[in-house]
Image (cartoon, helix red, strand yellow):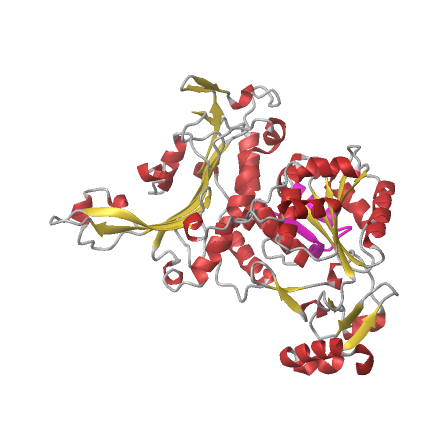
Amino acid sequence: MASILGPSLSIVTSYASRNEPQFVSKLTAVRGNSHSPLWFSYTRPGNPARNHFQLKSSNGVLLNAVSSKDGLAGTSSTKEDSKSQPLQGLFPLSNSECTGSNLSITVVGASGDLAKKKIFPALFALFYEDWLPENFIVFGFARTKMTNEELRNMISKTLTCRIDKRENCEDKMDQFLKRCFYHSGQYNSEEHFSELDIKLKEKEGGKLSNRLFYLSIPPNIFVDVVRCASQKASSKDGWTRVIVEKPFGRDSESSSELTKCLKQYLTEDQIFRIDHYLGKELVENLSVLRFSNLVFEPLWSRNYIRNVQIIFSEDFGAEGRGGYFDHYGIIRDIMQNHLVQILALFAMETPVSLAAEDIRNEKVKVLRSMRPLQLENVVVGQYKGHSKGGKSYPAYTDDPTVPKGSLTPTFAAAALFIDNARWDGVPFLMKAGKALHTKRAEIRVQFRHVPGNLYKRNFGTDLDKATNELVLRVQPDEAIYLKINNKVPGLGMRLDRSDLNLLFRARYPSEIPDAYERLLLDAIEGERRLFIRSDELDAAWALFTPLLKEIENKKIAPELYPYGSRGPVGAHYLAARHNVRWGDLGSEDS
C-alpha cells in the first residue's frame, strides 16, 4: 500500500502521528469511482471522525474540511458501521496532490435585491482574495426567465474590486463570471430542481461535490425549496448545507413550526441560520477584546458595570420595504435577532473553547437566564412626516404599501435583565429605530462611579459626566474607544473627558470585509460559531413572544416622533426609570 501511495500516505501518517498517535493504525485509503481523488480516512472511537483533520477558518477557529455528518436527514447507516463509528470523516489532500472535489453554490432567489447587492458581490470578493477552492461554480435559481449571459450582466453591475486596486481586477471578474450559471424554475417544483441537479453534475464533471444552497427568498417558501433541493439536488457523495435568511418566524409558535418542517429534510448541522450582524468586524472583536485582554475581563460584571446599551439606528424610513416591514415591525426585524444576539455574545460566560458548540452553549445559557420582556419596560414609536430645511419627509403611513392606520412600530426601546450571578440588577438597554437623526450601531458599556471620588467637586452634581464608558462602534467608521477623565494641561485643576480611541480605518488601512463574506466563508468551511442554533432561536423568541402578543392584542398605539429626530420622548423616560442616560445623546456622540 505504501509503495503505491508514495508520499501522500507519508504526509497523512506524519500528521496523525504528531497529533493523534494512538490512531495511526486506523488510517485507511479510500477511493470512490474512477473520477474520484484518493482520500484518507481514519476513525476515532467514541467521537465523530469529522473532527479528526482540521483547518483554520478566517476567524481562526479550527475547522473540518469535509464532513459526512452534513448528509441528508434520515440517512441510514449499516449495522456494522454503527457499531464502530457512526460517522466517518474524509479529508482531501492538498490541492497540489488532489484536486478532485468541487464546490457548487446555488443562490435561490438570484434575481432579488439581496442576491444582487450582497451575496454575489461577497462571493466575488472571496474569489478575488483566493478564499474559494480551485474548483467551484455558482448557480442562480429563480422564477425569472434568464440566460447565463443575462445573469452575468446583472451580476457584473454590482461587482467591485473594493478590497484593493490590484491590476488583475478585470481578469478576476471575467474568471468569476465564467463560473456563474443560471437555471429558471418554480420554487416548489421537484422537476425543476432535478433539472438543476443535472446541470450541476454536468459542471461538476464527475468530481466529488459539496453543495451550498443560499435561500435568498421570502420565508413562506423556505420549506418548499428545502424539500425540493434536499430530495432532488443534494450532493450524493459530499456535504449539502443550506443558509436560511431571517426572519425565522414571527413568534415562538411559527418559528418552532418552521424549524420542525426544515428538519423533515435537513439535520440541524445542515441548517445555517444567518444573522449578518454576527459577521460584523466589531461584533467579532467583542469576544477578543474581552477574553484576550486582562484589563477588561475582571471588570465584566455587575461589580463594575452600571449598565449596557445596544443601539441601532437608521437615518432612512421603510421606503420600498413598507409591505414587508409592516408584517414584522422593528422588534421582530432588528431587536429579536441582531440586538439579542449581540447581547448574548457580550454577556456570556467564558466558553470552554472557541468551538462553535461551546460558544453557542454559553449564549443559550444567557438567553435562558433573561426575564421575559414586560410592557412596562418597553417603549414603541412610529415616525411621522416632518419638514426640515425646505424638504418634506413622509410619515410611515404615507408609504402606499403600508396599510392606513397601521400601528406597526418603527422604533422600540427596551430594558432587559439577566438573572444570574454576573449580571443581576444590571439593566441592558437596547433601542432600534428607523428615520432617526443618524445611522449607527454600537455597544456602550457605562461603568459605575468611582467610590469616594476625590475630584467629584470638579464635576459638579452631574456625576454621569465622570463615568468611564467603553464604546464599540459597529458601524459606520468602526472604532473602539474608552472615555476617561484627565487633567487639562495648565496651572489650574480643570478636568476633561477624553477618548482613548482605536479608529479601525486609521490603524488598519485595508478595507474591512463585508459581513456576508465572513459568513459565506464560514458556511463553506462548516464553521457554525456565527450561525444561530435552533435552541438559541427558541430562547430568543421566548423573550419577545408574550410582549409582541400583548402589544398586538391590546393594539398599543406607538408614540409618534418626527422623521429625522432622536426618537420618541418615552425612550428617555424609560432610561431615566432605570437611572440610565442614553450614551449616544452627548454632544460628542451626535
402 to the left or right of 287: right
73 to the left or right of 435: right
Q: Residue furthest front?
A: 167
Q: In the image, what residue occupies the spot 23% across and 42% down?
A: 462
Q: In the image, what residue occupies the spot 50% across and 49% down?
A: 342
Indicate the quadrant containing the C terminus: top left, top right, bottom left or bottom right: top left
Residue 316, x across and y down, in percent? 50, 29
Q: Residue furthest left?
A: 491
Q: In the image, what residue occupies the spot 85% across and 41% down?
A: 192
Is 101 placed above or below 413 here? below
Quadrant of res 131: bottom right
All told, the count of numbered labels is 0
Residue 270, x across and y down, in percent? 71, 54
The reply to whether residue 473 is in sight is: yes
Is 142 placed above or below 260 here? above
The reply to whether residue 542 is in sight is: no
Q: Residue furthest top?
A: 390
Q: Is residue 333 magenta?
A: no
Is 165 placed above or below 50 here? above
Which span of residues is magenta-colored?
A: 253-274
Residue 436, x across and y down, in percent? 45, 31
Q: Is residue 270 magenta?
A: yes
Q: Closer to the camera, 400 or 42? A: 42
Is 136 placed above or below 325 here? below
Q: Closer to the camera, 556 or 96? A: 96
Residue 329, x across and y down, in percent? 56, 33
Indicate the quadrant containing the N terminus: top left, top right, bottom left or bottom right: bottom right
